[in-house]
Amino acid sequence: MSWFESFILGLVQGLTEFLPISSSAHLRLTAAFAGWEDPGAAFTAITQIGTEAAVLIYFRKDIARIVSAWFRSLVDKSMRSDHDAKMGWLVIVGSIPIGVLGVTFKDQIEGPFRDLRLTATTLVVMGIVLGVADRLAARDEAGGRHRAVRERKSLRELGVRDGLIYGVCQAMALIPGVSRSGATISGGLLMGYTREAAARYSFLLAIPAVLASGVFELKDATEGGHVSWGPTIFATVIAFGVGYAVIAWFMKFITTKSFMPFVIYRIALGILLFVLVGADVLSPHAGESAG
């Protein structure tokens, strides 16, 4: 892998990991259009750890409070009603679906689910779902001539049922093109949470799933072959820096703006993929390993 390739792939990883547009789809398309060789599982695993490090630093105060309260609640019963302690348990509960489904459907995830026609379908379908969810949130926030403004839920109202639903939504991202943040944010909005609450829990919920996946993939990949450590670490640094900037921008963006630009982009990209695959410009399996 060249330094230029590592720079571009790290940039794509950082830009797309936290936006509701699917990083796996963009990594695959970047490699396919550029005609680059598979960067390898270790590359993908390490760069994902880089973007999750950006989450850990950006939400470090929240994470420190949650972890501290959760550990104290194990020995102090009075702490079990604390919001941060509950959040610790809810992140664990919400992580169960992706762990179970990831193991159960491992062969399908690494096989049939990689087809670009399925990726195009999920880009369009989940784009529509995000659009509907965003529209419902906007209607609640704005009210109207014949309806009052409806107050949406905060994370303090999150319970086990909603945490599990969030987790199932996150597990849908095992299918390339769905987008981890897109699925969980859509689920949160459809359940009546604010944009900020849906996005915040989405980012927190991704931490154990992505870090665990990255560590296991990295272990398998490094044991099975050579890793270009220089370009890989360079890409990880790029992904970390860009990812941190994207999180900071995105959390400000969603407080006042609609998700519709992402909806339009997803649908347009999905349609373009259908056209390119249908015209034999792209193979349904192009850039498969890069995602």
Image (cartoon, grey):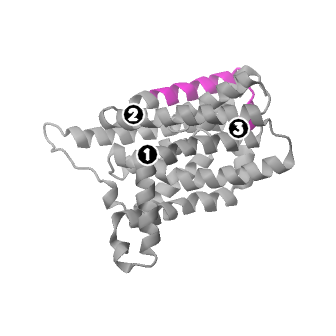
Q: Residues within 10 Å of mark 3 (few under 14, many from 20)?
A: some
The mark nearer the N terminus, 3 or 2, is: 3
**SS at mark 2 in the image:** loop
Residue drawn at 19 percent across, 40 percent down: 143
Cα–Cα gap, marks 3 and 2: 27 Å
Range of magenta residues: 264-291
Which residue is label 3 attached to? 115
Q: Are marks 1 and 2 in contact (CB under 8 Å)?
A: yes
Which residue is label 1 attached to? 185
Q: Locate residue 81, reporting x and y percent.
A: 33, 72
Q: Can residue 260 be seen at all in this image of the molecule?
A: yes
Q: Locate residue 133, reporting x and y percent.
A: 38, 42
Residue drawn at 48 percent across, 41 percent down: 182
Which residue is label 2 attached to? 259
Q: Nearer the viewer, mark 3 or mark 2?
A: 2
Tell me if residue 156 comes above or below residue 197 in the rendering.
below
Amino acid type at image mark 1: Ile
Tell me if residue 77 comes above or below residue 266 in the rendering.
below
Q: Locate residue 234, reporting x and y percent.
A: 68, 32
The mark nearer the N terminus, 3 or 1, is: 3
Amino acid type at image mark 2: Phe
